[in-house]
Image: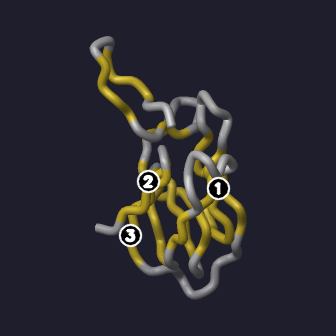
């Protein structure tokens, strides 16, 4: 299993990319406490069976708006599932952490 991780964003490669796909900039996550955002350039976003899917037709760059928090990562061409949990409002939850008070979202 191929995993790529940048902060709260984890991508799991699920297969090759289709031959032609339009490229867009997709926001994958935003930091709740620091207001930074994670974006990937030149991809197509899809939803399949409630899963968030990215089609990366050619190598793409996963970036963070605050480069002091996370360095850019090159994502090879392929199809990826964005790992996380969907909230009722349609937004996505990244990492979760255990605390004595219970399970909560992890800060970036």
In this figure, which residue is indicated by the disc labeled 2?
A: 10
Q: In x, y percent, where is residue 101? A: 32, 12
In this figure, which residue is indicated by the disc labeled 3?
A: 14
Badge 1 marks a residue whose secondary structure is strand
Q: Do the CB atoms of the residues marked 2 and 3 lie less than 8 Å apart? A: no
Residue at the top extreme, as displayed: 101
Q: In x, y percent, where is residue 44? A: 63, 67
Badge 3 marks a residue whose secondary structure is strand
Question: Closest to the observer: 82 or 105?
Answer: 105
Of labels 1 and 3, the one closer to you: 1
| First of labels 2, 1 by sequence position | 2
Name the residue: 51% across, 79% down.
Answer: 77
Left or right, 45 with respect to 106, comes to: right
- Quadrant including the N terminus: bottom left
| Distance of label 2 from label 3 (alpha carbons) | 13 Å
Q: In x, y percent, where is residue 70? A: 55, 51
In this figure, which residue is indicated by the disc labeled 1?
A: 39
Question: Closest to the observer: 70 or 11?
Answer: 70
Left or right, 74 with respect to 85, comes to: right
Q: Picture quarter containing residue 97?
A: top left
């Amino acid at each position: 299993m191929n995993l790529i991780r940048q902060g709260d964003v984890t991508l799991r490669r699920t297969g090759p990319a289709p031959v032609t796909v339009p490229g867009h900039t997709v926001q994958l996550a935003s930091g709740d406490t620091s207001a930074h955002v994670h974006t990937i350039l030149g991809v197509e976003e899809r939803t399949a069976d409630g899963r968030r899917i990215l089609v990366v037709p050619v190598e793409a760059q996963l970036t963070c708006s605050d480069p002091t928090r996370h360095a850019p990562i090159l994502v090879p061409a392929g199809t990826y599932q964005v790992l996380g949990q969907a909230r009722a409002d349609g937004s996505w939850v990244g990492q979760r952490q255990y605390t004595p008070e219970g399970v909560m979202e992890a800060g970036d």
